[in-house]
Amino acid sequence: MTSADLTLTPQLFAEAFPFHFAIDTDLRIVQCGRSLTKLCPAMREGAVFADIFQIVRPPLELHFENLRSIARQSVVLATASREVILRGQFVELSPVLVFLGSPWVTTPHELSRSGLSPADFALHDPISDLLEIVRLKDAALASASHLTSELDARHREQTVLNESLRRQMDESRKLDLALRESERNYRIVANSLREVLFQTDTAGRWTFLNPAWQEITGHSVADSLGKPFLDFVHHEDVPGNMEKFRPLIAREKDYCRHEVRYLTAAGGHRWVEVHARLTFDDDGRVTGTAGTINDITERRQADERFRVLFQNSLDAHLLFDESGIVDCNEAAVRMLRCRSKSEVLHQHPARLSPELQPDGRKSCEKCVEMDALARSQGHHRFEWLHRRIDGENFLVEVSLTPVVINDRPALLAGWHDITERHRHAQALLKAKEAAESANRAKSDFLATISHEIRTPMNGIIGMTNLVMETPLSTKQLQYVQTLRRSAESLMSVINDVLDHSKIEAGMLAVEKIGFDLRTTVEEAVRLFVGRAEEKGLRYDLKIAPSLPRYVMGDPARLRQIVLNFIGNALKFTPKGAIGVSVDPAASPPGQAPEFVIAVADTGVGIRPEKQALVFEKYSQAESSTSREYGGSGLGLSICRQLASLMGGSVGLTSRLGEGSTFWVRLPLEEAGADFPAPANSPIAENASQRPASVQFPGASILLVEDNTTNQLLASELLAKLGCEVHIAENGLRAVEMVTSRTYDLVLMDCHMPEMDGFAATQAIRAQEGDRHQPIIALTANAMQGDRERCLAAGMDDYLTKPIELSLLAQKMARWLRPAKAAASASAPVEPATFAPVLSSCVNLESALKRMGGNQKLLRKLAGSFCDAFPASRDRLLSAISRRDAKETGIVAHTLRGTTSMFSADKAVALLAALENSAASANWEQIDAAAPEFEQEMRAVIDALRQIGASAPVT
């Protein structure tokens, strides 16, 4: 069978949907199913749909656009007379709307009355099964009714037989007075009964009463015999009592039962249940009545208390058994918006509910389950969606309890309307989502503004790098190095605001890498030497000789804390000295060694009552501090939180007018001798200046990257490191290539078509044997949590785009054994010799540094990017116009990665904003950012075309 064999022809469509019809934009019927025409002859081609049907649910005016807006939603249609009701949904098959559904028929009688038969329905239509179930149910009910009738008849026969036997015994006593012993035994039995046995004559006078009469009423038997029984009936109940006896006296019935109040000797009354039959003589003449009287006072009192509670309860209550609802209180009537109880009595509770509950289950099926749980557990509480008489749905909390009514099992349902509570919960959820959205918007703003600040800072750092490549004297080199470190420190300060935002959101994590503790502290102190000398301050650095050289921790965050402490000391010390010390501290047994770094000054000091506020955010020791010394009061708060993240603590000691000592205490494990050099160590710093000093000759590298420009850049950088490069354009191809041969290292892009890097890594891990395949992630995302996601997927390391040669070499050195290149291979990096064609939108120095000073590679990548950009731009704008959020995010992410290699920071920030907005489908923000993105990218492309066309200046 082929796909062609499965094509739905018009004939098959008509068979599958016999009740369908199609309408055009004028609401004229252009096609109608055979069964629908049979059901409603007015439905024919050319007729106006609005003249025949109206929409019952949802209530809408009959316009084509209104119908199209509810396409694929459940609708109910009905003629004006409600003789024909359809349920189904509209499907848009431009330029018409097609209704697919069937008649609303609930009983075989309705089906017959409509002129339809099961053959008029499609085989897949559940109406046939439903009607069969209804037919079987009716048959079962009829059988049950017949069986009940038979049981009643047999019970009556048994009662007649019993009475006949009793009459025979009475006749035997009259005929045989000798049987006095039998009569004595009978009296013993009668006297021991708790219920009253009585007899009356035709005048209604007591002729026999057993002792239970006196126990119940207080009247003696002797005084009561011979008196009419009506003398003992409450005067309000006499008419009703006579009415109950009338059918018995008229010989219309041979048995009667009723409840009545009998007067007591104490002046009160007792409720009793009377069972009576006629008595006859041998000739068949009525001689009176005989029967029993039971005391039911306590039961009636309990029933009355229940009735009062039931009717006066503020919550709605219903009583129902297998036959339906037998009673409800006024609160239930009001809640259901009924005119009277009669509108709900004898209905099943599931009929007062929509077809489906919020969890998607059918109300009728779930109702049976809830009833069973209540009967098995003795009580059951749950939420339920009910429907008022006017069709409005409302949510209630149901308390279901089994009870017994007239010796029959039933259920008492208490309803509490929780619609408002549910709406409040939904409002709280929406408020939470709005707050989270606002927090995301704040993060997006901080990310964007940080890009704007970093652009000139990258220029400063890039220019210092270029100056360092020129011949310099020792003193000049020290000046430039200090300038570079200062710029990098300033960049770190700029990140404080972002750090605080990340800390507040719980998104900032610290690293644990090997670093030189002594050098890290020395560099921090060196940055402030000039400022200390300018103020005439002495400075001193004391590092304990026993201090280990290399430790494991986060050098950047440690440096950030020390810089903040020293900066504060300089700010608040007008004269005297500043001292920095690093000493080991006592640590608990079995835990990492701890060290204390302290910064002491002879400054203004802090009042004792203000010291507790120093490490609080936005707080300073005195209200005038920010005016006199500047600062936002945020730095020390960040220090405290950073120390806490690193497992340590901060504190201070101070005396007003004498100075302060700020300290940080951190656990730092001693690092092994073979740890990789971190990016900010002198080793890594030298590596960034001489990117070709480390080589990986013959290393087989699999580059998994779908973007051709990124492929070109990474291939060139890897070739410069002496590697043999193999390329896979997506994750699926990467899995195939890793399966077929061995690679020393895999560089895996995270976001690709067909199969992304996360899935590809998991597939590689699932099938690798004893040999572990090193995989380094490549991604344009640098947000907190991205690294953890990569590692969780099975990747070994993480490298953000744009790729820099020095960082790439550093990462590779962690997983491959590098070899020193020959001295001749370490050619110095050429200074930037491009013609001055760049605008502020592209940072040439930063881009050139990233590519190891390779001008030819930069020109080649610029030309490749300019050629590929128009297609990517059109794809992005097309996705935006189609409101395709997923495609918008994918294209923006890919463009961000390639654009970042040219240090086009504003364009990168705009692409990041587009990507973030696409993640939440915020089209208002996307529409606002798209024109600015196009304008910025035109400037970027113009600059890059000039780079590609320019030649080195000789």
Image: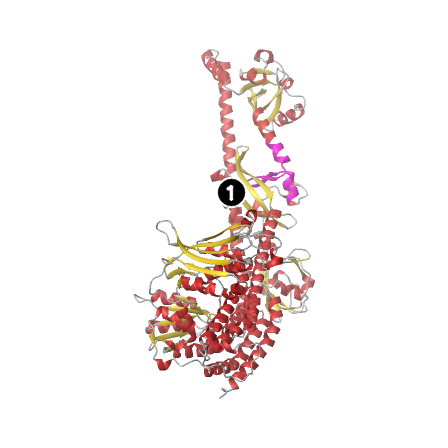
Residue that extends furthest to the left in the rendered view of this protein: 770
**Tag 1 secondary structure:** helix
Is residue 297 visible in the rendered structure shown here?
Answer: yes
Is residue 87 visible in the rendered structure shown here?
Answer: no
Q: Is residue 316 left or right of residue 845?
A: right
Q: Is residue 42 left or right of residue 598?
A: right
Q: Say whether residue 426 is magenta.
A: no
Q: Is residue 327 left or right of residue 547?
A: right
Q: Relative to 169, say whether 782 is above or below.
A: below
Q: Position of residue 123 (x, y in %)?
A: 51, 61
Q: Relative to 381, say whether 286 is above or below.
A: above
Q: Give the amino acid type for the residue marked by disc 1 in the picture.
A: Asp
Q: Say whether residue 308 is magenta.
A: yes
Q: Position of residue 399 (x, y in %)?
A: 55, 40
Q: Where is residue 545 in the image (x, y as percent from the top left)?
A: 37, 58
Magenta-drawn segment:
306-335
Q: Bin the neighbour count of mark 1 within 10 Å (Cα to Cα): few under 14, some 14-19, many 20 and up.
A: some
Q: Nearer the viewer, residue 187 or 737?
A: 737
Q: Nearer the viewer, residue 894 or 601?
A: 601
Q: Which of 589 and 500 is in front in this view?
A: 589
Q: Dot 1 corresponds to which residue?
A: 371
Disc tally is 1
Q: Relative to 266, say whether 766 is above or below.
A: below
